[in-house]
Image (cartoon, helix red, strand yellow):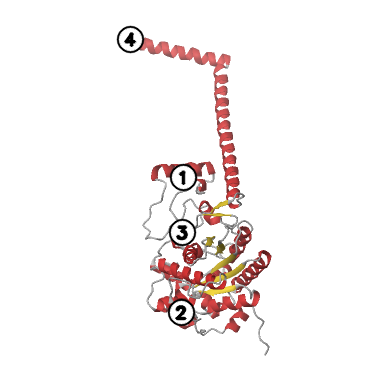
Amino acid sequence: MASNNMSCNKQIAENSVRSQSCIRTGFCRIKGTATRKKCLHLLAGVVLFAGLGEITCRLTERIYDLIRINPTGDIVNLSALNYNDTTVSRRRTPGEFRILEFGDSFVYSTVKISFTPSSVAANLLGKAGAPTRVVNLGEPGTSFFQYRQALEHWAGRIESDAVVVGIFLGNDCVDVARHLVPDDLSINGYLRENFVEISTGRKRLADARHRYGLRLLDFAADALDIMTTGQYVSANIPEPHSGLYGQLPEERFMEQTRLLAVAGEPAHSAELARGWQALADTGRELARVSRKRGIRVAVVLSPAEVAVNARLWRKAALQAGIDPQSFDPTLPGRMAEEILSKVAPDVAVLDLTPIFVCAAARGDTLYPPREIHWNEAGNRLAGKAIARFVGRAWLDLPQDFLAESDPCLDAMPLPAGRANMTTCLVDAGLLAAPRP
């Protein structure tokens, strides 16, 4: 015990001497200052390294994006840009009729590449002896402004014989009128920044998600995600659909159904004036491109299920307390055709509405339950209609060239509904009011 006390006393004395020495010489203060400097230098180095890494990361990403969206080589890798397509040469292939197709998710489609209307139409035309390439440049979540921007961009980079713009009669006009889609949304912006390749479910580290403010952290987090959870996203999606497919809860689906009926309600014609004007501008742009490049141009009008399935509209209207008679299923198509005939009469128009109404009336199921896009049968019907139109109007093929004939392809235009076309055009500001 005494020995322990002596040891403790000795240690205390040494510490006391050391402390007094530090006070006299300032050595400890100098040592602490040096340590702080080292820490500050280390911190500055880390910050500098991270800053340079972040700048390099962002600059590299920007350059990579610009190269992808502005290809200078002979091949354009559309799948790298997340389009629902593969690759295409910038120059037209000899003997091949090439069409550039623009539009929203109905052109992009919720099915895999070989089942899209673009692929179906090209395959059918090829079987008829007319090699055709339909380049699918559809972008989900876009509308008229983006169609025109994409047309200007890609028509100058990929040679073609024709251009088709697919217009969804359900919400294209509404989205523009209600500013539901930003006017300045960049070309391929939504697709290019998507971490997952929609058609395959493959994760793409080159397009890491923006989550943490620093791209270094974003890339590190998504690299870790790929290492720990695998290269592909697993989802219970029925074949042959892709990652864009998604059934909605019943309440949300009925809300969407009511939204997709707005363009067919005459009472909303004035409200949708901006959307209808955007359609007119799109028609004018197509006519300009046709004159400038000497190519064929057309518009394909795709109907919403609410225009094809009367029972669905009645259910949605009654749930919302709306008069079912307020909706005219023929109005969106009639408005579109009338507007295009006035501003761009040389632009061909294919309205799929009567074809889909005919097929639905005979019992075909063309839309999945609680999903606004077409199922495989709907996509195939649209593809056959496009193939028949292209074959007859642009390729001079025989009337019966399609091996897979379908009586509904010859469906007559639907009888005009209750809506007065002149009144709707006047309300939308696209026609002067008649003089009394």
Q: Position of residue 412 (x, y in %)?
A: 49, 81
Vertical comparison of 282 with 159: above or below: below
Direction from residue 113 to residue 99 in the image, left or right: right
Q: Quadrant of residue 295?
A: bottom right
Q: Which residue bears the numbered disc 1?
A: 222
Instruction: Decide: few, some or many residues near mark 3? Use Cα within 10 Å; few <14, some 14-19, many ≥20.
Output: many
At mark 3, the secondary structure is helix
Mark with earlier residue (3, 2)? 3
Label 3, label 4: how far apart the Cα atoms are: 90 Å
The disc label shown at residue 113, or none: 3
Q: Position of residue 301 (x, y in %)?
A: 53, 72
Mark with earlier residue (4, 2)? 4
At mark 1, the secondary structure is helix
* Callout in the foreground (1, 3): 3
Q: Position of residue 146 (x, y in %)?
A: 59, 62
Label 4, label 2: how far apart the Cα atoms are: 99 Å
Label 4, label 1: how far apart the Cα atoms are: 64 Å
Q: Which residue bears the numbered disc 4?
A: 2
- Residue at x 60% of width, y 46% of height: 63
Instruction: Decide: few, some or many residues near mark 4? Use Cα within 10 Å; few <14, some 14-19, many ≥20.
Output: few
Label 1, label 2: how far apart the Cα atoms are: 47 Å
Q: Amino acid at mark 2?
A: Ile
Mark with earlier residue (1, 3)? 3
* Callout in the foreground (4, 2): 2
Quadrant position of the N terminus in the picture: top left
Q: Which residue bears the numbered disc 2?
A: 322
Vertical comparison of 7 with 385: above or below: above
Q: Quadrant of residue 158?
A: bottom right
* Callout in the foreground (3, 4): 3
